[in-house]
Image (tube, rainbow, N blue to C red):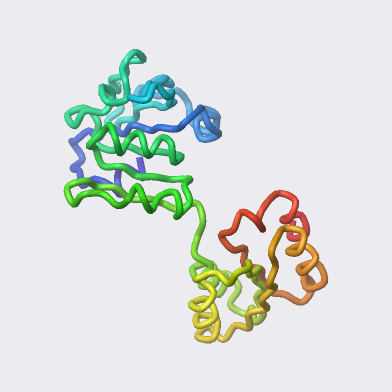
Amino acid sequence: MLIAGLTLPMTATEATTVLFLAREESGLFRWWDAATPPSPARSAHLSIITQTEASLSGFILTTTPSVPPIANRNLTLAEQCPPHHTDVMVAFDREAAQAAMQECVAPLLMVQVSRQQATPLLDVPPDRRASAIYLEAHPLLNLQLARVLLPHARTVGVWVPTPAPPWLASLREEARRLQITLEEMVVSDDLEAVRALRPRLTRLDAVLLPPDLTLINEWSLKPLL
C-alpha cells in the first residue's frame, strides 16, 4: 500500500489496484503470506502468461479492502493489466518489468533490479510512467548514512573494484566534505576483498560495500558478519 500511496494521488474514497509481478513465486510472496493474514484486499496467487509465452507469478492488491480485487487465473498479462483495471504495476525482477513495459500501459515501479538492468527500461516515451528502486545504493549515499548513524566515525573502509568505478571520484569528494578518511582497498575479486579486509577490520569504524557482484557474496561477507 505504501507503493501505491507514493505512486498515485488518491482520495480516501478512491480504490487503487496494484498488480505485483515476478518471474516466479519469489521470497517476497512467501514473506507476504507469512507476515500478513488473509485479506479480501489481496487476490490469490496468479500465474500469468506473457506474449512470449513466458510465465509470471503475481497477485492483485487494492487499497479498498471492501472491494475484492478482480483476478482471473486464465488471463494473459495484457488482459490482466488494462488501464481501467490496473492503476499501477510493481515488478520484482527484470523479466517481469520488461514484460510489463511491452504489454501494459499502467505506471510501472521496478524493484529488486540493478541500475544496469533498469536503465534501458526507463528509456521510455514521455507518455509512459516508469520508475525504479535500485537493488544497489550509490556508495556516496551509504557514506552519508554512515555519518548519520555513526557521527563519531573517522575511518571508513571501502572495496574499490578494478578498473576504478565511476562512483569513486564523487565518493572521495564526499568523504572530504564529511571529514572522513577513506581507506581504499583496491581489489579485483572476492578473494582479494577478504584478504584486504581482514587485517583492517579492528581499526575501521565502518565498511562500505560497493555495488559490485564480483566482490559481494555470501562468502566475502563472512568477515564482516
Is residue 69 placed above or below 14 in the rendered structure? above
Say which of 184 and 176 sits in front: 184
Residue farthest along the top direction in this orientation: 74
Question: Number of callouts in the render?
Answer: 0
Say left or right for 147 vs 91.
right
- Residue shown at the point (28%, 31%) measured from the top left: 103
- Residue shown at the point (26%, 33%) measured from the top left: 104
Say left or right for 201 vs 180.
right
Q: How far across and down, in percent of the image, does residue 6 sit?
A: 30, 49
Q: Quadrant of the N terminus?
A: top left
Say which of 151 and 141 sits in front: 141
Q: How far across and down, in percent of the image, does residue 187 sit?
A: 70, 67
Q: How far across and down, in percent of the image, does residue 197 sit?
A: 76, 68
- Residue shown at the point (66%, 68%) measured from the top left: 159
Q: How far across and down, in percent of the image, does residue 61 sit?
A: 34, 30
- Residue shown at the point (40%, 24%) measured from the top left: 39
Q: Quadrant of the C terminus?
A: bottom right
Is residue 77 placed above or below 112 in the rendered structure? above
Say which of 81 and 191 sits in front: 191
Say left or right for 77 vs 191.
left
